[in-house]
Image (cartoon, rainbow, N blue to C red):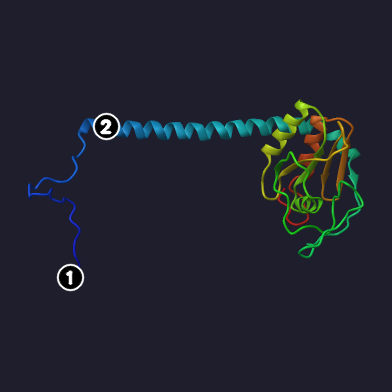
Amino acid sequence: MPKSRTRKNRKAPGGSGLAVGKSSTPAERRRNKIIIAVSVAVAVAAIGGYWWKSAGEERQFLALASQGKAVLARVRNERSLGGGHLLPGRSRSYPSRFPTSGSHHRVPTVPGFYDSQQLATQLVHALEHGHVVIYYDRPGAEVLDALRRFAGLYTGLWAGVVVTPMPGLGRKIVLTAWAKRLDLPEFDAPAAAAFIDAYRGRGPERTVR
């Protein structure tokens, strides 16, 4: 049986022979082209602006990191407690409130800024992924804004920044990476940036930097 063909121009009811829907005029077509071109230009400009802003923020961050490199001499090398996933339903305690290694939850903490305290077992898995985990308590509004910017700047799967509260620190900031730790009595932007730049993306599960 021969296949039916779809007709491009359907006749209007009553057999008038006119196509359904009026074709646009040359002026309308020109206007539509202009609208499309403007929309594309705006989208490209927005994407380019976002990229340029992000690139500019990273340049500023790397400049800070360069200023703070001297602090890396104060980074503590922590004894490795190994790794591996805990069995489902199991939990564990660590010898420090700021663990930097050890068996851990199967799901890591996703990079970002957190207002609520995150599970230690998930934070350790985040360190294994190569993320830097930063602990804060009440460091002041300006410091919190800076920490939010750091967390927003690096969100990669293997090289991000996690910022989480830890009650009792006051103005102190603690930065951790896998088997690494730096305590800052008060927030020091160049020092924090230097630590992040030195250890972000260098976790044992997959080194990407």
Q: Residues within 10 Å of mark 1 (few under 14, many from 20)?
A: few
Give the residue displayed 75% in from the left and 41% down from the top. Answer: 116
Q: Position of residue 53 (x, y in %)?
A: 60, 31
Q: Position of residue 128 (x, y in %)?
A: 77, 54
In the figure, 25 relative to 156: above or below? above
What residue did someone put label 1 on? Answer: 2
Q: Position of residue 207 (x, y in %)?
A: 74, 53
Residue 141 appears left or right of 75: left
**What type is the residue that disc 2 sits on?**
Arg
Nearer the observer, disc 1 or disc 2? 1
Q: Secondary structure at mark 1?
A: loop
Q: Nearer the viewer, residue 193 or 147?
A: 147
Looking at marks 1 and 2 on the same chain, the residue that comes earlier in the sequence is marked by: 1
Residue closer to the observer: 70 or 35: 35
Residue 171 sits in which quadrant?
A: top right
Residue under circle 2? Answer: 30
